[in-house]
Image (tube, rainbow, N blue to C red):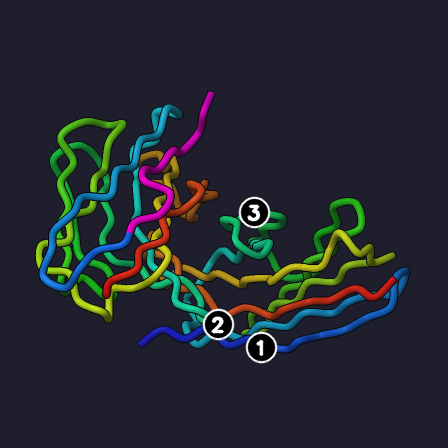
Amino acid sequence: NAGVTQTPKFRILKIGQSMTLQCTQDMNHNYMYWYRQDPGMGLKLIYYSVGAGITDKGEVPNGYNVSRSTTEDFPLRLELAAPSQTSVYFCASSYLSAGIKYQETQYFGPGTRLLVL
Amino acid sequence: QKEVEQNSGPLSVPEGAIASLNCTYSDRGSQSFFWYRQYSGKSPELIMSIYSNGDKEDGRFTAQLNKASQYVSLLIRDSQPSDSATYLCAVPGAGSYQLTFGKGTKLSVIP
Protein backbone atom coordinates (compact mmCIF):
# COMPACT_ATOMS: atom_id res chain seq x y z
CA ASN A 1 0.00 0.00 0.00
CA ALA A 2 1.24 3.46 -0.89
CA GLY A 3 -0.93 5.03 1.84
CA VAL A 4 -1.70 8.69 1.17
CA THR A 5 0.02 10.26 -1.80
CA GLN A 6 0.09 13.93 -2.76
CA THR A 7 1.19 15.77 -5.88
CA PRO A 8 2.98 18.02 -6.57
CA LYS A 9 5.65 18.10 -3.86
CA PHE A 10 6.44 21.75 -4.47
CA ARG A 11 4.90 24.50 -6.54
CA ILE A 12 5.41 28.22 -7.09
CA LEU A 13 2.33 30.19 -8.14
CA LYS A 14 1.88 33.77 -9.16
CA ILE A 15 -0.83 35.82 -7.49
CA GLY A 16 -4.18 35.16 -9.13
CA GLN A 17 -3.22 31.82 -10.65
CA SER A 18 -5.18 28.65 -9.98
CA MET A 19 -4.08 25.14 -9.23
CA THR A 20 -5.27 21.81 -7.90
CA LEU A 21 -3.46 19.85 -5.23
CA GLN A 22 -3.99 16.14 -5.71
CA CYS A 23 -4.50 13.61 -2.93
CA THR A 24 -5.08 9.87 -3.26
CA GLN A 25 -5.35 7.13 -0.66
CA ASP A 26 -5.41 3.39 -1.22
CA MET A 27 -6.51 2.29 2.26
CA ASN A 28 -10.25 2.42 1.53
CA HIS A 29 -10.67 5.11 4.16
CA ASN A 30 -13.99 6.91 4.20
CA TYR A 31 -12.79 10.14 5.84
CA MET A 32 -10.33 12.48 4.15
CA TYR A 33 -8.98 15.84 5.25
CA TRP A 34 -7.01 18.81 3.99
CA TYR A 35 -4.81 20.78 6.40
CA ARG A 36 -2.46 23.67 6.02
CA GLN A 37 0.56 24.26 8.24
CA ASP A 38 2.26 27.61 8.51
CA PRO A 39 5.77 27.90 10.04
CA GLY A 40 5.75 27.35 13.80
CA MET A 41 2.05 26.64 13.79
CA GLY A 42 -0.07 23.58 14.18
CA LEU A 43 -2.26 22.18 11.47
CA LYS A 44 -5.42 24.01 10.50
CA LEU A 45 -8.27 22.06 8.92
CA ILE A 46 -9.38 23.46 5.56
CA TYR A 47 -11.99 20.95 4.37
CA TYR A 48 -12.93 17.40 5.12
CA SER A 49 -15.03 14.66 3.57
CA VAL A 50 -16.90 11.80 5.22
CA GLY A 51 -17.36 9.88 1.99
CA ALA A 52 -17.72 10.22 -1.76
CA GLY A 53 -19.96 13.14 -2.64
CA ILE A 54 -19.93 14.64 0.88
CA THR A 55 -17.65 17.49 1.89
CA ASP A 56 -17.72 20.11 4.63
CA LYS A 57 -15.79 23.17 5.69
CA GLY A 58 -13.15 23.14 8.36
CA GLU A 59 -11.63 26.01 10.27
CA VAL A 60 -10.02 27.92 7.36
CA PRO A 61 -11.96 27.18 4.10
CA ASN A 62 -11.86 30.62 2.47
CA GLY A 63 -10.05 30.63 -0.87
CA TYR A 64 -10.29 26.87 -1.35
CA ASN A 65 -12.67 24.35 -2.85
CA VAL A 66 -12.84 20.58 -2.75
CA SER A 67 -14.67 17.73 -4.38
CA ARG A 68 -14.85 14.02 -3.68
CA SER A 69 -16.15 11.96 -6.55
CA THR A 70 -14.44 8.71 -5.47
CA THR A 71 -13.40 7.13 -2.21
CA GLU A 72 -9.74 7.37 -3.19
CA ASP A 73 -9.35 10.96 -4.40
CA PHE A 74 -9.82 14.28 -2.64
CA PRO A 75 -8.39 17.20 -4.66
CA LEU A 76 -8.03 20.71 -3.24
CA ARG A 77 -8.56 23.63 -5.58
CA LEU A 78 -7.11 27.12 -5.20
CA GLU A 79 -8.94 29.46 -7.55
CA LEU A 80 -7.16 32.81 -7.12
CA ALA A 81 -3.87 32.29 -5.36
CA ALA A 82 -2.89 34.88 -2.75
CA PRO A 83 0.36 35.26 -0.77
CA SER A 84 -1.56 34.30 2.39
CA GLN A 85 -1.96 30.82 0.89
CA THR A 86 1.78 30.22 1.01
CA SER A 87 1.97 27.18 3.25
CA VAL A 88 2.53 23.45 3.45
CA TYR A 89 -0.59 21.47 2.64
CA PHE A 90 -1.21 18.02 4.08
CA CYS A 91 -3.86 15.56 3.06
CA ALA A 92 -4.90 12.90 5.56
CA SER A 93 -7.32 10.02 5.75
CA SER A 94 -8.92 7.82 8.39
CA TYR A 95 -11.53 5.12 8.73
CA LEU A 96 -14.49 5.59 11.03
CA SER A 97 -17.25 3.03 11.48
CA ALA A 98 -20.83 4.17 11.76
CA GLY A 99 -21.69 4.98 15.35
CA ILE A 100 -18.09 4.90 16.51
CA LYS A 101 -17.49 6.95 19.59
CA TYR A 102 -13.89 7.95 19.16
CA GLN A 103 -11.85 9.56 16.44
CA GLU A 104 -9.43 7.15 14.84
CA THR A 105 -5.88 7.56 13.64
CA GLN A 106 -5.36 9.94 10.75
CA TYR A 107 -2.68 9.01 8.22
CA PHE A 108 -0.92 11.86 6.52
CA GLY A 109 0.50 12.30 3.05
CA PRO A 110 3.99 13.76 2.49
CA GLY A 111 2.71 17.28 1.92
CA THR A 112 2.79 19.90 -0.83
CA ARG A 113 4.84 23.06 -0.34
CA LEU A 114 3.18 26.01 -2.04
CA LEU A 115 4.75 29.42 -2.53
CA VAL A 116 2.62 32.25 -3.89
CA LEU A 117 4.53 35.25 -5.19
CA GLN B 1 -13.50 27.89 19.82
CA LYS B 2 -11.78 24.66 20.75
CA GLU B 3 -8.23 25.22 21.93
CA VAL B 4 -5.25 22.96 22.38
CA GLU B 5 -2.27 24.52 24.10
CA GLN B 6 1.32 23.32 24.14
CA ASN B 7 4.60 24.91 25.19
CA SER B 8 6.36 25.73 21.94
CA GLY B 9 9.80 25.01 23.36
CA PRO B 10 12.36 24.32 22.30
CA LEU B 11 12.77 21.69 24.96
CA SER B 12 16.32 20.44 25.24
CA VAL B 13 17.20 17.26 27.13
CA PRO B 14 20.43 15.24 27.26
CA GLU B 15 20.54 11.83 25.67
CA GLY B 16 19.20 9.17 28.04
CA ALA B 17 17.05 11.59 30.04
CA ILE B 18 13.25 11.71 30.27
CA ALA B 19 11.51 14.26 28.06
CA SER B 20 8.15 15.52 29.31
CA LEU B 21 5.74 17.16 26.89
CA ASN B 22 2.50 18.76 28.04
CA CYS B 23 -0.80 19.67 26.46
CA THR B 24 -4.00 21.24 27.77
CA TYR B 25 -7.33 21.35 25.97
CA SER B 26 -10.48 23.40 26.35
CA ASP B 27 -13.30 21.03 25.36
CA ARG B 28 -14.36 19.02 28.43
CA GLY B 29 -16.29 16.60 26.25
CA SER B 30 -13.27 15.41 24.29
CA GLN B 31 -12.96 11.62 24.41
CA SER B 32 -9.75 10.79 22.56
CA PHE B 33 -6.28 12.28 22.49
CA PHE B 34 -3.39 11.89 20.12
CA TRP B 35 0.32 12.60 20.01
CA TYR B 36 1.92 13.02 16.60
CA ARG B 37 5.63 13.34 15.88
CA GLN B 38 6.77 15.54 13.01
CA TYR B 39 10.34 15.59 11.79
CA SER B 40 11.50 18.76 10.07
CA GLY B 41 10.16 18.87 6.52
CA LYS B 42 8.10 15.71 6.99
CA SER B 43 4.47 14.88 7.65
CA PRO B 44 3.02 14.08 11.09
CA GLU B 45 2.97 10.46 12.19
CA LEU B 46 0.96 9.06 15.07
CA ILE B 47 2.98 7.80 18.02
CA MET B 48 0.38 7.50 20.79
CA SER B 49 -3.36 7.64 21.32
CA ILE B 50 -5.14 7.56 24.67
CA TYR B 51 -8.81 7.41 25.55
CA SER B 52 -9.03 6.72 29.29
CA ASN B 53 -7.71 8.49 32.36
CA GLY B 54 -4.36 7.24 33.54
CA ASP B 55 -1.23 6.07 31.81
CA LYS B 56 -0.68 4.21 28.57
CA GLU B 57 2.76 2.84 27.80
CA ASP B 58 4.22 1.84 24.44
CA GLY B 59 7.93 1.11 24.50
CA ARG B 60 9.78 4.25 25.60
CA PHE B 61 6.65 6.37 25.27
CA THR B 62 4.03 6.93 27.98
CA ALA B 63 0.91 9.01 27.49
CA GLN B 64 -0.83 10.34 30.59
CA LEU B 65 -4.40 11.63 30.61
CA ASN B 66 -6.25 13.59 33.29
CA LYS B 67 -9.69 14.56 32.01
CA ALA B 68 -10.63 16.41 35.20
CA SER B 69 -7.67 18.74 34.70
CA GLN B 70 -8.02 18.68 30.89
CA TYR B 71 -4.41 17.72 30.61
CA VAL B 72 -2.55 15.16 28.54
CA SER B 73 1.17 14.57 28.56
CA LEU B 74 3.77 12.49 26.75
CA LEU B 75 6.85 11.11 28.45
CA ILE B 76 9.79 9.84 26.44
CA ARG B 77 12.17 7.71 28.48
CA ASP B 78 15.81 7.15 27.54
CA SER B 79 15.60 9.98 25.00
CA GLN B 80 17.61 9.47 21.82
CA PRO B 81 18.86 12.02 19.28
CA SER B 82 16.43 10.40 16.82
CA ASP B 83 13.58 11.64 19.06
CA SER B 84 14.46 15.23 18.11
CA ALA B 85 11.32 16.47 16.38
CA THR B 86 8.22 18.56 16.93
CA TYR B 87 5.49 16.81 18.91
CA LEU B 88 1.91 17.75 18.14
CA CYS B 89 -0.99 17.20 20.51
CA ALA B 90 -4.33 16.65 18.77
CA VAL B 91 -7.79 16.54 20.30
CA PRO B 92 -11.22 16.15 18.65
CA GLY B 93 -14.10 18.12 20.06
CA ALA B 94 -16.99 16.34 21.73
CA GLY B 95 -19.07 14.62 19.08
CA SER B 96 -16.70 15.80 16.37
CA TYR B 97 -14.41 13.92 14.03
CA GLN B 98 -12.34 17.02 13.44
CA LEU B 99 -8.99 17.18 15.17
CA THR B 100 -7.73 20.41 16.69
CA PHE B 101 -3.93 20.47 16.79
CA GLY B 102 -1.69 22.34 19.17
CA LYS B 103 1.18 24.35 17.73
CA GLY B 104 3.62 21.67 18.79
CA THR B 105 6.61 21.42 21.10
CA LYS B 106 10.04 21.20 19.50
CA LEU B 107 12.23 18.66 21.28
CA SER B 108 16.00 18.54 20.92
CA VAL B 109 17.89 15.60 22.40
CA ILE B 110 21.53 16.51 22.90
CA PRO B 111 24.07 13.67 22.46
* Residue closer to the observer: A102 or A113: A113
Q: Which residue is mark 1?
A: B8
Q: Residue furthest right?
A: B16
Asked if the magenta segment contains residue B23, the reply would be no
The image position of residue A62, as x and y in percent, is 14, 65
Q: Chain of mark 1?
A: B
Residue at screen point 75% across, 51% down: B82
Measure how far apart labels 3 and 1 are at the Cα level.
19 Å
Query: Under tag 3, what secondary structure?
Result: strand
Q: Are marks 1 and 2 in contact (CB under 8 Å)?
A: yes
Where residue B80 appears, x then y in whole percent?
82, 55
Disc 2: host chain: A
Residue identified by numbered label 3: B46
In the picture, measured across the screen, residue B77 lies left or right of residue A54, that is: right
Is label 1 or label 2 in front? 2
- B1 relative to A109, above or below: below
Q: Secondary structure at mark 1?
A: loop
Quadrant assignment, res A110? top left
Amino acid of disc 1: Ser
Q: Amino acid at mark 3?
A: Leu
Residue B36 position (above or below residue A30)? below
Which residue is label 2 attached to? A40
Residue at 42 percent across and 40 percent down: it is A109
* Relative to A90, A12 lies left or right: left
- Position of residue A98 measured from the top left corner of the image (x, y, whole percent): 30, 36
3D distance between C-alphas at marks 1 and 2: 8 Å
Image mark for residue B17: none
Label 3 in the same subunit as label 1: yes
Which residues are the magenta region?
A1-11
Q: What residue appears at the point 78 percent right and 67 percent down from the top-left corner? A: B19
